[in-house]
Amino acid sequence: DANLVKRKLLSVKRTIMKERYAKPASTQAAALSSLQSLQERMNKMLALAESMDKAASEVVPDLEKADLSLSQTCLLKISSGDILDFEHDEGLSGVICWTNESCDLTAYDTGSVLLEMGSPNLGEEISSLDALTTTEWGPVKCATGEAVTVGPRNFGDLVARFVFLAVPPLSPSNDDTEWDRHTITGSKPTTDAEADALHYLDTGLRAAVRSSFRNVKTTGVETVGVCTITTKPSDDSDAYSRSLNVVLDTIVEESKRTSLKKVHLIAASGAEANL
């Protein structure tokens, strides 16, 4: 890196000083040639260090939009915003909505807005879902790693006629810090507990995405919108980027098994979309 190059520069400078003052008069001509060679090396290394410093300081601009081809018939659009920024084309459309096992959209901000825009039909559809079981936290209408479908209906101001409720092993608010204790940037899990936690995170995310796209496939939806689902961004953990990559990889894989024409993946920010 640039710091290593700079350390080498200091070493070259010390060599130049030794050559300049330690050589006897009889060898000054040879020493001068050596010094010139060392000076040329130093100038090249200095230019390299400056270019590396400049490159390291450059900030990658936030991504606004990107269109990628998943197949001959399906396009992946990536942008920043929230699920309400879903760009749909003509034809049947749906949105994948991250939620909890009770399918309680009022538990987080985006869900509450979605519920309000889809009222009253969206609330009625969710309320009519059967409970699989009941726990101390309420009825379980969809298990973690699974997804359920509501629709097709006219959901008020929502352009989507289907809503796919999916339950990941993360908070729909993208503010989990629980996983940060189990991962260390740039290193492998150090204990069995950490390895088990990462395995649960990965498999739970993949399962929730796969279940959503299986439901998408059965409905014949042509355009679907989905937000990223992640842990809270942290410099001390790679769980954030790990969860982003797992979701993206699974979306790409599962989209190819459907008749979708477009998948709109919506990141929380331009910086997140760049990842």
Image (cartoon, grey):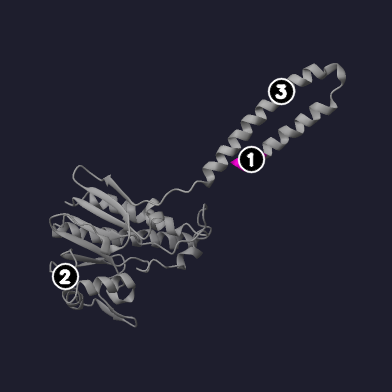
Q: Residue at x 37, y 51 (%)?
A: 63
Task: Report helix, strand or loop for mark 1.
Answer: helix
Quadrant of the rendered structure where residue 144 is?
Answer: bottom left
Q: Which residue is mark 2?
A: 155
Along the polypeptide, which appears first: circle 3 or circle 1? Answer: 1
Along the polypeptide, which appears first: circle 3 or circle 2? Answer: 3
x and y percentages locating residue 127 in the rendered image? 20, 78
Q: Is residue 57 above or below residue 91?
A: above
**Front residue (pair 19, 205):** 19
x and y percentages locating residue 180 in the rendered image? 48, 63
Q: Evaluate if marks 2 and 1 touch, with contact meaning CB atoms under 8 Å apart.
A: no
Task: Report helix, strand or loop for mark 3.
Answer: helix
Q: Amino acid at mark 2?
A: Phe
Q: CA distance from mark 2 to mark 1?
A: 60 Å
- The answer to whether residue 193 is seen in the rendering is no
> In this picture, which residue range is highlighted in magenta?
1-6
Is 268 included in the stretch rendered in magenta?
Answer: no
